[in-house]
Image (cartoon, helix red, strand yellow):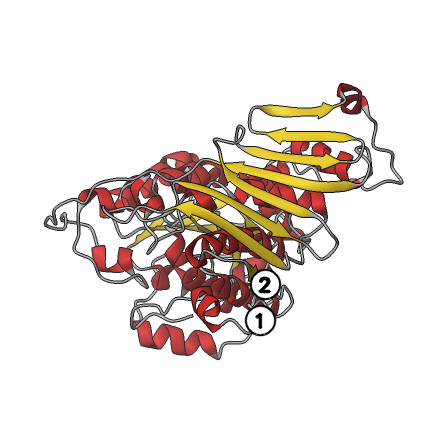
Amino acid sequence: MRGRAISRRGFLAAAAGAPWVVSASALGGEGRPAPSDRVNVGCIGVGGRGTSNMQTFLHASQVVAVCDPQEARRDAARSTAERHYSELMAKGTYRGCAAYNDFRELLARDDVDAVSICTPDHWHAVLCIAAAKSGKDVFCEKPLTLTIAEGRAICDAVTRYGRVFQHGAQRRSEGNFAFACELVRNGRIGELRRVRVSSEPSHPAPNEAPAPVPQGFDYDLWLGPAPFVPYSPRRVRTPYWYWIADYTLGFISGQGVHFTDVAQWGMDADATGPVEIEGHGVIPRDGMTDTAVEWHVEMAFANGLKLVYDDHRAFPMGVIFEGTEGKVNALCNGISTEPKSRMSSVIKPHEIVLRRPRGHIPDFVHCVKTRERTAAPVEAAHRATSLCHLAHIAILAGRRLRWDAVREQFPEDPAANRLLSKAPRAPWRL
């Protein structure tokens, strides 16, 4: 079923005053089964990662709509969904997959229970908030936002409208990382003193001459809240857009949030942040890309913990927890401990036992049905992404910064506070 077309002004005005609603399919109305049998999902952004996630949603739920400003991508995604459900279509129990250029048409449908958001980061806040206001549960890829202010706005919207939210930090659904954090939180390495995080950096790339926008690509909609810049092919292609500050903070957040997330999980710091940040880094000043290619940032927490965040020259990507009686290495290439005997430690039922979902997207679909808390909830997503933002801001500031993790402000520092938000390009707003 194709949703009705509505204007930007009309959609945002209506959504701002809309009460929390439960979709018709969630109630099992009009002959549709309740979520215990099926969750209807709309996939917004069906590029490489978006298509990969959609493949999992095809099995874990029912994809009824896709959206992308590139016509070829959305048509391919629609065809993939309809091929997957071809037997159901033949029986008349699946009415096909609609393909939209504009996400507002998808969100206007009352038969969509949840959305998967896999767009560049500069779109995440507008999409997450609009989806929550429309009564949709949200799976949003990492990193959560482009700015800290956007993250708090998403948290507020998810809470206000009673939405289920899952962040695409899938290591929260991987048992080896859960075990690493259990070792730390249950004292197997003594008192935790320092946490080290390492991530792949961004890379420099030269400027590219403007080119005509390809037919079938709504480039203005792709830019959305970001400043207008003439189209060039590399600008909208992975991984280049990941290294452009108008669309994301680079791999300091795009890759790094996986590991700041594991760090705060092991630190039991999902609802807080540091009190002081200081660091330095290298950001290209010429060329298309303008996000950090090198960095070293240190963050101090109120309880005395120190988090050190480096690019991956320090050690392979991941997290190292250092305690008074040993270490836990939670790295991309495997989990290990020092001493090695800690790896054979058994976490007892009365100790801290972390969730081990059977898959990140299946966990989200399960929570949509049950209204349980997901493995990677919105506040944890915001705080993990904020650590990346704070590192980036410290590099830009080039000096020690004090941070109020409750108010989410730099006390008496208007210059640093100006880096907490970005004004979206009109007519977009949060």
**Res. 61 visible in picture:** no
User: Upstream in the sequence, badge 2 or badge 1?
Assistant: 2
**Which amino acid is tagged 1?**
Pro
Q: Which residue is mark 1?
A: 411
Q: Percent position (x, y) of residue 358? A: 64, 35
Name the residue beneath numbered marker 2: 402
Label 2, label 1: how far apart the Cα atoms are: 7 Å
Query: Depth check: 206 or 25 in front?
Result: 206
Please name the amino acid that badge 2 sits on. Answer: Arg
The structure residue drawn at horizontal position 63% and vertical position 38%, both measured from the top left corner, is: 173
Q: Which mark is residue 92?
A: none
Q: Say above or below: 169 vs 429.
A: above
Give SS at disc 1: loop
Quadrant of the frame with the N terminus: bottom left
Q: Is disc 2 in contact with disc 1, using a CB cutoff of under 8 Å? A: yes
- Residue 426, position in %: x, y? 29, 72
Q: Quadrant of residue 233?
A: top left
